[in-house]
Amino acid sequence: MMKNLKHITGLILLSLTIGTAFGNNTKNKEVINVSGAEQILVGKKDNDNNTVKIALLLDTSNSMDGLINQAKAQLWDIVNQFSYAKCGNGHRPDLEIALYQYGNDGLSSREGYIQQVIGFSRDLDEISEKLFSLSTNGGEEYCGEVIQTSLQQLDWGKNPDNLKMIFIAGNEPFTQGKLNYKDAVTNAREKDIIVNTIFCGDYQQGINTEWKKGAALTGGEYMAINHNKHIVHINTPYDNIIIKLNSKLNNTYISYGASGSRKLELQSRQDNNAMELEEAVAVQRAVSKSSGMYKNSTWDLIDASEEDEFDITAIKKEELPSTLRDKSKAELRAFISTKKAERKRIQEEIQELNVKREIYIKEHAPQEKGELENAMLNAIKKQASGKNFKWE
């Protein structure tokens, strides 16, 4: 009897100990059932950062060349603005962008002349590449259908703290197509997604063709822009220095894995695309690359080393650049550490120069924001306040 009592007492104490351990440690762990009895605690990464999800739906019919050019040129400045944003918990938000084109005769009529160009992505180089791949052609612009398609195809998630927005831009009546836009935007509202409409043309004409109503149904913003307007950028004494530093920054990227070399080439190609548009765009891209918004842990050893689960011993030699394959694991760690410090120094220098650059612009003449950029940022900041986002 006494033996059984001791056995029972031991089980109770063991249960209490396990229960206490569970209570103290399950916050950052995931519980997995094994054979219906055992439970194992495995690491589960905190998702402290709220996410901003933006689906950009662009009309790529014949008259929209100016809109596409604005999107290419102003992407980096929009991204840079997010480097100043903070969630309610004090962390920087993550930014995911998806891109659709619609209203283009080159697209499938069976799909309603609609194409997902890229789903939600944090890969800024891929997003830039897809923007530069767009070309215009005549077509039918079905606003309701492209909104509904983005709702169905994209993974919007269910986190109520995330800011989820659609920006649709075009210049034909919002009512075109078989699917009533009111049904599409009502579906968006039910998913806590705000629809913002950008009419490329006269403000009153956009109202008359129901672009404003399309936004109002979800509490979104209606905006009209001159999509053909060319923004004159102000050159500063810091631009060339930042561009040179960008080249040095590129030398700190060490590709690995199956996609490493392709991604490294993509990075260089998007630098060239930005420079071909305008030097100021290349500067804005360099500033983005020096911020926390530009992350490439899937192919760059330096960014990958910042991840909690990074394990240098798990990387096969053949996945590394040829110059690193004969290095020992200790030598690789030292190499990564050196490159990481070099990158941090360059990024900080670019950020410091950008502060001086922005002061120079304000002192000499206020640089006008791009039409598309201005419209999007005004709506983003206004709607972000409802999710407890703040800008510094």
Image (cartoon, rainbow, N blue to C red):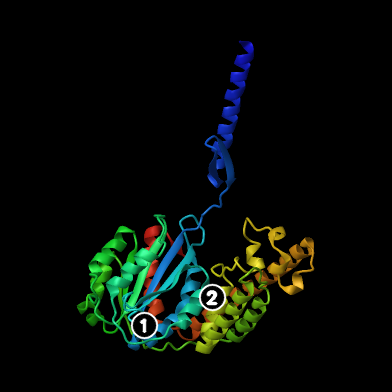
Would you name the residue on which mark 2 appears?
125
Please name the residue shown 63% across and 17% down the image. 6
**Percent position (x, y) of residue 366?**
45, 83
Please name the residue shown 67% across and 79% down the image. 248
Counting the numbered discs, the total is 2
Quadrant in the picture for the N terminus: top right
Q: Are marks 1 and 2 in contact (CB under 8 Å)?
A: no
Taking depth in this image into account, of 240 and 31 the one nearest to the observer is: 31
Taking depth in this image into account, of 43 and 51 the one nearest to the observer is: 43
| Residue 139 appears in the picture as rendered | yes
Please name the residue shown 26% across and 63% down the image. 186
As measured in the structure, the alpha-carbon distance from the residue carrying label 1 to the one carrying label 2 is 21 Å
Q: Secondary structure at mark 2?
A: helix
**What amino acid does circle 2 point to?**
Asp
220 is higher (above) or lower (below) than 176:
above
Residue at the extreme front: 110
Residue at the extreme top: 1
**What amino acid does circle 1 point to?**
Thr
- Quadrant housing residue 53: bottom left
Pointer 2: residues within 10 angstroms few (<14), some, or many (20+)?
many
> Which mark identifies residue 279?
none
Q: Secondary structure at mark 1?
A: loop
Pointer 1: residues within 10 angstroms few (<14), some, or many (20+)?
many
- Quadrant housing residue 269: bottom right
| Residue 196 appears in the picture as rendered | no
**Percent position (x, y) of residue 286?**
57, 78
Relative to 279, is 56 on the left or the right? left
31 is higher (above) or lower (below) than 209:
above
Would you name the residue on which mark 1 appears?
60
Taking depth in this image into account, of 24 and 291 the one nearest to the observer is: 24
